[in-house]
Image: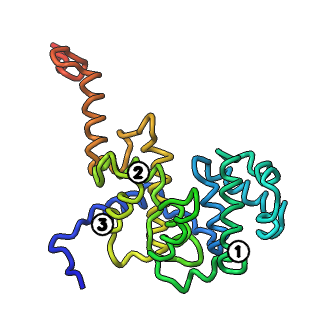
Amino acid sequence: MQAAPLFPDVRLEELHQRLLVHYGRPPEREVWDPLTQFIYSLLSSRTKTETTHQVLRHLQSRFQRWETLRDAPIAEIEDALQAITFAERKAIQLKTALQQITERYGSLSLDFLRRYQTEKIRAWLEHFEGVGPKTSAAVVNFSTLRRRAICVDSHHLRVTQRLGFVAKSADARETEARLMEMAPPTWSAPMLDEHHMLIKLHGQRLCTFADPKCAVCPLQEQCPTGSSNLSTRNRTKHPAGKATSETFAKPLAK
């Protein structure tokens, strides 16, 4: 058994608490079966959450059963996916994955995965085209499997890189590995899910790609990127050698 570090890294816990205070506790997730979560996550890449939810509901209404979706022509599936990004490619990936699941296990279900260890499940899922660590983490963590994993999306990558938790070249797999090292072992699967939702919300609201709101960020004290951004803005507003209204006090009235 690996010994606990002498000086544990508590930065992730501190970050989590600051985001909880700032945003409040995220709404409880509607937990789906593994197959439904797999389909949703496969479709969600580069697509807004609200749009992917709408498309998933449309698939359920149009095809009624996932077996019907599996057996539908590619053109019909693609038509049903028009609202999402890369609909043509994802239609092929989705149909192929559903067919392969059925061929390997005799029925269209992923409930059998609960018999296996988390890493084995994730490795198996990542054999499907279009499935990487983000999707496999989502399936094991968000679904009724409820295993310990962190789903690292583009927001998570951006925020953790700016905080200096990982290198700017780190991908989703490297980032998740580092964050799992930092996460307290007492954090359950739902707690790791909550962490994902808070980071995602922060990336959408304040730590945005093009215009991060560093001045009002609750993580400002932790973030070297935010401190640098604010310092640069202050130097731009008040260049050295130029007096401002704040530089010199007004003379006292006589």
Nearer the observer, 94 or 21 = 94
Q: Residue at x 47, y 75 (%)?
A: 189
* Mark 1 or 3: the one toward you: 1
Sequence-first tag of 3 and 2: 2
On the rendered structure, is 84 left or right of 141?
right
Relative image position of residue 153 (x, y in whole percent)? 48, 54
Q: Which residue is mark 1?
A: 102
Structural distance between the alpha carbons of marks 1 and 3: 38 Å
Q: Which residue is mark 2?
A: 157
The image shows residue 103, relative to residue 82, as above or below, that is below
Q: Residues within 10 Å of mark 2 (few under 14, many from 20)?
A: many
* Mark 1 or 2: the one toward you: 1
Structural distance between the alpha carbons of marks 1 and 2: 34 Å
Sequence-first tag of 1 and 2: 1
Marks 1 & 3, CB-CB < 8 Å contact: no
Q: Residue at x 82, y 60 (%)?
A: 72
